[in-house]
Amino acid sequence: MKFQWTLLLGLAFALIVAVFAVINVDSVTVNYLFGESEWPLILVILGSVLMGGIIVGSVGLFRMFVLQREVKSLRKKNKTLEEQLAQKETAQEDSAQHQIEDIH
């Protein structure tokens, strides 16, 4: 259900940007560090939205990569701790059996 809402919100946002871009078709001056040029405002708007999406997507992928590495290390640590616990439980059972045998 969450994916459907995300998709609907994304489509609504894309529609709003497209309508806004089509309304603004005048030519504007874009200043670069090394010069300037004339571009239609629709291309500037769509380019800005595209760059924003790429930046947000990159940050999201980076965070996902970091979290996956953390999950992997925590799973490894959990497995190690479970093995240590199992060894301690086995050692306690063995000592308990030796005590029972010593009593008899």
Image (cartoon, rainbow, N blue to C red):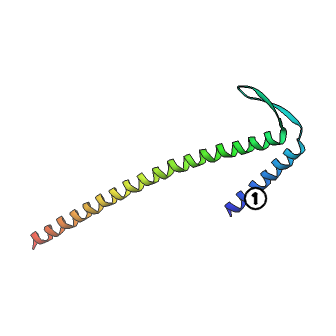
Rendered image quadrant of residue 30: top right
Relative depth, front residue between 45 and 103: 45
Q: Which residue is mark 1?
A: 8
In the depicted structure, whether residue 22 falls above or below residue 104: above
User: The C terminus appears in which quarter of the rendering?
Assistant: bottom left
Rendered image quadrant of residue 72: bottom left
Residue found at the very far top of the displayed protein: 34
In the depicted structure, whether residue 102 falls above or below residue 56: below
Rendered image quadrant of residue 6: bottom right
Relative depth, front residue between 69 and 45: 45
Identify which amino acid the numbered label 1 is placed on: Leu
Q: Position of residue 91 (x, y in %)?
A: 21, 63
Residue at (67, 61) in percent of width and height: 3
Relative depth, front residue between 42 and 101: 42
Q: With 62 as the anchor, is 48 left or right in this view?
A: right
Residue at (84, 39) in percent of width and height: 41
Residue at (18, 67) in percent of width and height: 94
Q: With 101 as the anchor, is 6 left or right in this view?
A: right
Label 1 element class: helix
